Amino acid sequence: MSADDTELMARRGRYLTDFALRIGWDKDGPEGAFEYVQRTSYAQGLGDATKAGWKEAAIAWRVCGSIHLQYARGKDALFTSRQADYQRHYDAAIGKLGDE
């Protein structure tokens, strides 16, 4: 991995942490920033069944999958399964957009 790639990953990590803090993540809590954003985005998508809500949920699932792809490849024993989950949830949110 090049120095540019390492810096890009570090910037994404800082962005994710900052975003999580802005939406209410407790840094001292039991879950990490990534998990909090993921759970919150999913809950938002489920709780707000409007087109805008499902669009936001689809975007959030795509972003979570992308971040997981960058940070967890080779480190997460369930990498393939989690990536499939992100895609499944993304597809479900896109499907909800078409239902309305």
Image (cartoon, helix red, strand yellow):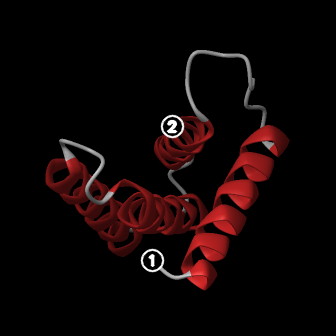
Front residue of 4/50: it is 4
In-front residue for pair 44/72: 72
- The amino acid beneath tag 2 is Glu
Which quadrant would residue 80 be assigned to in this image? bottom left
SS type, badge 1: loop
Q: Which residue matches tag 1?
A: 1
Q: Name the residue under label 2.
A: 35
- Give the residue drawn at x 60%, y 79%: 3
Callout 2: 10 Å neighbours few (<14), some, many (20+)?
Answer: some
Q: Quadrant of residue 74?
A: bottom left
Mark 1 and mark 2 in contact? Answer it, CB < 8 Å.
no
Q: Residues within 10 Å of mark 1 (few under 14, many from 20)?
A: few
Left or right of residue 71, residue 86 in this image: left
Q: Can you say whether 75 is above or below 8 in the image?
A: above
Judged from the image, the secondary structure of the residue bearing numbered disc 2 is: helix
Q: State the image coordinates of residue 4 (x, y, percent, origin top left).
A: 62, 84
Residue 61, label in figure: none
Q: Which of marks 1 and 2 is nearer the N terminus?
A: 1
Can you say whether 21 is above or below 85 in the image?
A: above
